Amino acid sequence: METPIVTDADRPLKTPVDDPFQECLPHRTTPKAMELLYHSDSFVVVRFDVPAEAPGVLGRGGYEIVDKFARKEIFLEGLLAESFKAGVEQLAEQEPSVEEFDAYIARFTALAQQPVAMH
């Protein structure tokens, strides 16, 4: 039997701790720049939020989706990220099963080209 690969996403989440970079970057408005949103046997979805560094400048962010079986990932930003978010919110209103969420996410991972690198 093949030994499964265990990644950080497979480990339980730890309790949040103070952001060690907060004192180095006093202009940051939020210490939480990355958040695990979804984790199933097939996929991991992480939201990235990079706040604007100056007033009047747009912040950046998006969603990283990792397909565990294909071992590929994709980063969604801009309009594609907004479309993904809207679809998830609409689906969540229906109280979907894990299989239904996975089927929705799989529509986006079909575009994934980046192989997952273990580091």
Image (cartoon, rainbow, N blue to C red):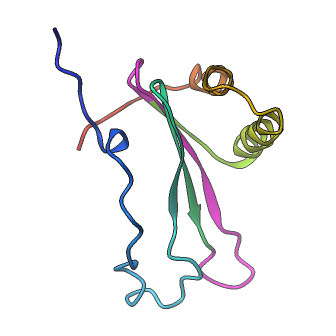
Residue 60 image position (x, y, % from top left): 63, 62
Q: Is residue 68 magenta?
A: yes
In this image, 22 relative to 89: left or right? Answer: left
Q: Is residue 32 above or below residue 73?
A: below
Give coordinates of residue 3: x percent, y percent: 17, 19
Q: Is residue 58 left or right of residue 63?
A: right
Question: Nearest the camera: 115 or 91?
Answer: 91
Range of residues picked out in magenta? 52-72
Specify whether residue 78 is painted magenta. no
For the C terminus, the image quarter is top left
| Image quadrant occupied by the N terminus | top left
Q: Please say if 78 is above or below 44.
A: below
The image shows residue 31 at horizontal and vertical percentages of 50, 76
Residue lying at 39% horizontally and 79% vertically, measured from the top left: 18
Residue plotted at (34% across, 80% down): 20
Q: Residue 27 falls in which quadrant of the image?
A: bottom right
The foreground one among 66 and 100 is: 100
Q: Quadrant of residue 61?
A: bottom right
- Horizontal side, residue 39 vs residue 116: left or right: right
Find residue 92 and report its horizontal and vertical position in percent.
76, 38
> Residue at horizontal 76%, vertical 33%?
95
